[in-house]
Image: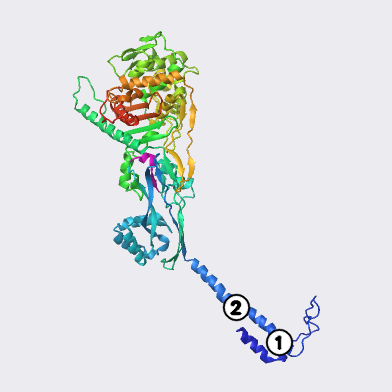
Amino acid sequence: MVPGCLGGLAKNGADSAPQFRTGRGAVPPFKSTLGPLPQVKGSQRIVLVAAIFALLFGFLGIRLWFMQVAEGVAAAEIVYNEGLVSVVTPAPRGDIRDRNGQLLVTSRVVPMVVMDRKLLQSSEKDEAIARLSARLEIPADWIEALYDEAGVNQRFPLAVVDTTTAYELEEQIRSFPGVVIENYPERIYLAGGSLSHVIGHLGFPSADDLQQRPHLDPNIRIGKLGVEGFYDQWLQGTPGERVYRVNQAGRITEERTEVPPQSGATLYLTIDEELQRVVEDALLEGIELSNLIKDEERERPLEDGETRAALNPTERAAGVVMDITNGEVLALASYPDFDPQEFVWGIDRADFSRLSDQKAFLNLVVGGLYPPASTFKAITYTAALTYDIPFAEAIEGVDLVGRRINCDGELVLPEIIDEGSPQVFRDWYYPAELGWLDIHEAFEHSCNIFFYNVALGVWRNWGNTSREDILQDMARSLGYGAFTGVDLSGDQAGIVPDRELFEEWKRIQLEDPAAPLRLDPARLSLASPWLGGDLMNLAIGQGDMLASPLQVAVSYGALANGGTVWTPRVVSQVRSPAGELLWAAIPEAKSRLDLPDWVVDSLLSDMNLVVAGGTARRAFSDFGPSVNLVGGKTGTGQSSANRDSHAWFVGVAPINNPKWVVVVLVDQGGSGGRVAAPMGRLIMQYLMGEELDPIEAGEETN
């Protein structure tokens, strides 16, 4: 094109050369500051003109080529890129291991059939779903439900397939519009239902999750409950990306690029898996024992005038073992439990409803609140010795000089009836008698009357003074009435009742008749609804006092170690997939109570009396040679009229150098000495290296 133009100009000769004109309207000749243009004569002038035209037309030709070719290529690239689809590929979640490195939870890559609505024409939907349903043997209505839930322009995993099926689908992918085969991470829970309340499960983000963490992908499962939830951001990893090119029909024609996902970090738990199994077995055997005892009770003939207690089926229990030197949780079990594997690709609605009805998702160790019952006597005991609480005078059955109480099964206080409190307090062993006991013997045999008198001493001597709350202050300093701070969801603060709380409840009930009734309406007319009987109930862990098994473990740990209240933890460290340390837990002391050494030693010694000859003696009768190095306390928590008592046991070992605290609770399990103590004994036998004996009924005690 350009040579042709130049050839045409050359044929016209010199006569065709442009002429510059001067005068009105003429363009003056260009004046260069470099001097006059060289003079051109004859044939030189023709060559020059031809060169100028060649340059002009060459420039035009290049510009035309650029417009037709280069810009055309760019335009084509734009069109090409408009056919690109970018998808996020989920990252494998990090592993979870126990304190010894035992693998508990991991992720593996599996072939996944994924349906992407961006790749599917609306007219193809029904046929595509029908074909997939037939090929994968999945109900069409189930696929359609997932399709609708995914929303516009979204993708969703449909089914895990084996490698053969994945290969066949890849070969026939044009017959399945909107479908891609991708490698998806699948969560594998190697322990099954074991440790379910520590580990948790997976689920799609809720509306609250998305509001609190806007960066979350609503189509990628996150951790729910347990460490899966608490440490979700460590475990999630970094998603990858795959870019496809699709044609106008939405068919994938090419995979352009792929950025592989990065696995999440590895959690190392404080849990010892082998000990965990022992605790879980103890819970199941304890529940079975409780139900066996109830079956026998149902068959027992009633004596004249005797009524049968509530005998509801025993279904729930909790157990925890904690290192009292640093707060590490070595085992934590709650029953009923659940299998987190069922949640990996979505749990059936019926199964979810069943688990919800059973309250299987409630971690009783951290979230179950119960009257601590006689286990709380350790707090009353410690306060009585530390602060030298005096007995009240003029009370029948009190030896002020010898500091002994006549535990004859009944405490009668007719003079406090005007205060609205009950005037008769009967002990658990009534009508039997235990005789005159000091504080050590009263703790060993769990005499309520002795600890009632400790509370009466506070009430009569220090009531309505700053020292009236001496028992409550001791309890709070040991962790009651506050969150434990454990790195699990569901932590509960519980209740430590006092005058201030009761007056607050009174105010609420008077102002709002529709408010929940926390106080008997008869108390609302009293100047203060807080009465001496309430303090007496508190002294034995009854009344409105509520605590979780973990709070009880924390408090006993502090009593045994000299007063340090540790924040319990279930995760010790976080490491990268390559093993690099990313984070390590540092033992955290929430508070420090300066307990006299002699008080701590006295308590530990008396806890040994409980298992050697007290309320847990039958359960520990065949413990083994190290029985002299373990201590315990039983408890039987009263419940409402139509519910059975709750069985408690707390153990500490070894008492000469305390290392472990063990807490067992059986919801509506009956007697602490008969049901919970044998369970605690089994766990402590394991800790002390003794031979494990079967769980059999202990003695009916408080």
Magenta stretch bounds:
194-203
Residue at image location 37% in from the left, 21% down from the top: 540
Numbered label attached to residue 490: none
When asked about the image quadrant of residue 549, the answer is top left
What x and y, as percent, mark residue 391? 42, 12
- Looking at the image, residue 369 lies above or below residue 195: above
Graded by Cα atoms within 10 Å as few (under 14), some (14 to 19) or many (20 or more), the crowding at tag 1 reads some
- Which quarter shows the N terminus? bottom right
> How many marks can you see?
2
When asked about the image quadrant of residue 446, the answer is top left
Residues 700 and 627: in front is 627
- Looking at the image, residue 557 lies above or below residue 357: above
Residues 688 and 518: in front is 688
The kind of residue tagged 2 is Leu
What x and y, as percent, mark residue 479? 45, 28
N-term-proximal mark, 1 vs 2: 1
Pointers 1 and 2 in contact (CB under 8 A)?
no
Q: Mark 1 highlights which residue?
A: 47
- Of helix, strand and loop, which one carries label 2? helix
Residue at image location 27% in from the left, 33% down from the top: 285
Residue at image location 40% in from the left, 64% down from the top: 121
Query: Is 651 one of the magenta-colored residues?
Result: no
- Which quarter shows the C terminus? top left
- Of helix, strand and loop, which one carries label 1? helix
Work out how far the residue at label 1 is from the one at label 2, CA to CA, in angstroms.
25 Å
Graded by Cα atoms within 10 Å as few (under 14), some (14 to 19) or many (20 or more), the crowding at tag 2 reads few
The answer to whether one can see residue 522 in this image is no
The kind of residue tagged 1 is Val
Q: Mark 2 highlights which residue?
A: 64
- Looking at the image, residue 62 lies above or below residue 333: below
When asked about the image quadrant of residue 615, the answer is top left
Residues 303 and 552: in front is 552
